[in-house]
Amino acid sequence: MCSAFARLKRHLAAALACLLLLAAVALAVTTANSAQQQSRTSSSGFLALDQLAQTNQAPQEAPTGFDNQSNGFVESQVHSQDQAAFDEVEGIEDGLGPVFNAQACRECHQTPTTGGVSQVTELRVGRVNRFGQFENPDVTIGDGSTVIANRSLINDRGICPSGEFPDIEVQEHVPDHMNVRTLRSSLNTLGDGFVEAIASTTLLQFANKQCGEFGDGVCGQAIFVPVAEAPGQMRVARFGWKNQHASLLSFSADAYLNEMGITSTLQPEDVTKLCDTVPDPENTAEDGDVADIDRFARFMRATKAPARDANLASTFDARLGEQLFDKIGCDTCHVPKVVTAPAGSVINGGSFIVPDALGNKIIHPFSDFLLHNVGTGDGIVQNGGPLTALKLRTPPLWGVRTRSRFMHDHSALTFNEAILRHGGEASSAVRRYRFLRDEERQQLITFLKSL
Ligand code: HEC
Ligand code: HEC
């Protein structure tokens, strides 16, 4: 495997990365049988590590804010146009559906502004068979005429019956005997350009460090996933509750198809042709000067990271709470500080070069972007293989105060409940939380409310 990397003619960094990778491969499940919301990518590929540029400069704090301004990646006018695409409500004539969840990215990514989070959840189901393996459902629609095969996502909306097709029933329903079922909440995308710019080796290092520290039971798993825009290339995943994707362009194409039913050059086929009148791919650069998926990705890449509640963050309680957060080990998974790859680094399987605006930046995502079993796991397997059925990616806590409900399935309504829901790998941290004095627990929660 190392010779494969040597072929890439990288220098010392590559050699180091290679060693790290070999160490991490034991943890990384590299099969990619079904991507995020089921993209049709190949089931294997080349494990591409990012080609890191060198820098002597000290890293700078990334810009933060909910002000709809560009972080410097694009001009403000371009950013406004891209935001308009993210906000745009699509109709049937644009390719919406046949099955879908909502009409605009913004419908589910909106608070406190475009790109943020929302209360919207999605439905996923499946079945554990008698051999203990997870199976995706085959969903029958059209009064039994058509099957949407091998897909755990159940779309909540459909475009038919309609005036044009009064007799076609396209709505998906959960098949009988689905013994795995979960809701999955929307995620914040503000600041995600910085997350995309984190070197894969940085995430592998988090995993190595955690798994090497015996005693606390924390051992995050990194998985490699296909990069849709770099065919055959796999990169360390970081986006989605199950770490379905490594690149924002891949996620955009996936979301456009699976949330809105709109096909693109990267996801060129609708999940069903029933009452579909718009030829695939439904949106390309010809429909505008820039294809929508490119606008969505560029929009997210240009967003500022979520800003803290500065008033609350400066209080004595929040500052003490932050120390307690670190002291009891929440910071092992919810990593407070990460530095992005230097500008000029080549990432996403060779398809994207980290620009100045995103490179060598200090961010405070409060996540290691690794999969963990904290006892809440949903049972769904996507592209991480069977070992990931009960795992979820540590959700970044930046901007968590903009959420009204917590955890992947919204099963916690207060911060205290969210913390107490953690078990599994987080058991030691939660035990220490329980041992805190009431006043200290409040301070820790004040800190969370400031994020
Ligand atoms: C119906 C609601 C809905 C719509 C519409 C929607 N999303 Fe999402 N989005 C979600 C949910 C739910 C998740 C978490 C999904 C998961 O992990 O399975 C998510 C996750 C994401 C993420 C991962 C963020 C992270 O940091 O991990 C990105 C990026 C994203 N969406 C982009 C988009 C784009 C671009 C569009 C428009 C094409 C879009 N979404 C439309 C609900 C939606
Ligand atoms: C072993 C890794 C790990 C540790 C340690 C850990 N967490 Fe988490 N945390 C997670 C994962 C994974 C989830 C998502 C679980 C889910 O959605 O079911 C999560 C979810 C959360 C959420 C909800 C976020 C949201 O967007 O809904 C909060 C708040 C949180 N953790 C705070 C804490 C605090 C405070 C501590 C320390 C007491 C802590 N966590 C320790 C991994 C960890």
Image (spheres, helix red, strand yellow):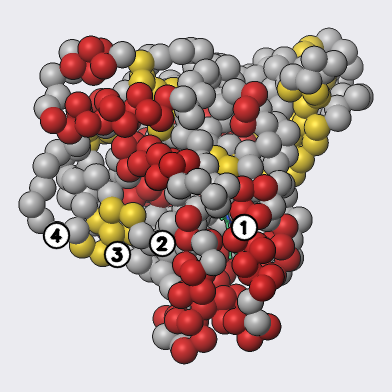
Q: Which residue is mark 1?
A: 428
| Discs 1, 3 touching: Cβ within 8 Å | no
Q: Which mark is residue 336?
A: 2
Question: Nearer the N terminus, badge 3 or badge 2?
Answer: 3
Q: Which mark is residue 65?
A: none
Residue 79 at least partly seen? no
- The amino acid type of the residue labelled 4 equals Ala
CA neighbours of label 3 inside 10 A, class few (<14), some (14 to 19), many (20+): some
Residue 238 placed where, x, y %?
45, 40
* Mark seen at residue 58: 4
Circle 3 residue = 63
Where residue 54 sits, quadrant-wise, is top left
Q: Nearer the viewer, mark 3 or mark 4?
A: 4
**Does the CB distance between marks 1 and 2 fall below 8 Å?**
no
- Label 1: few (<14), some or many (≥20) within 10 Å? some
Q: Earlier in the sequence, mark 3 or mark 4?
A: 4
Q: Is residue 201 left or right of residue 429?
A: left
Q: Within 10 angstroms of label 2, few (less than 14), some, or many (20 or more) residues?
A: many
Q: Nearer the viewer, mark 1 or mark 4?
A: 1
- The verdict on label 4 being within 8 Å of ligand 1 is no
Query: In the image, what residue occupies the spot 31% across and 13% down?
Result: 1
- Where is 98 relative to 81, above or below? above
In three-dimensional space, the C-alpha distance between marks 1 and 3, rounded to whole angstroms, equals 34 Å
Q: Calculate the distance from the C-alpha at mark 1 to the C-alpha at mark 4.
A: 35 Å
Q: CB atoms at circles 3 and 2 under 8 Å apart? A: no
- Mark 1 against mark 2, which lies toward the viewer? 1
Q: Residue 2: x percent and y percent?
A: 26, 16
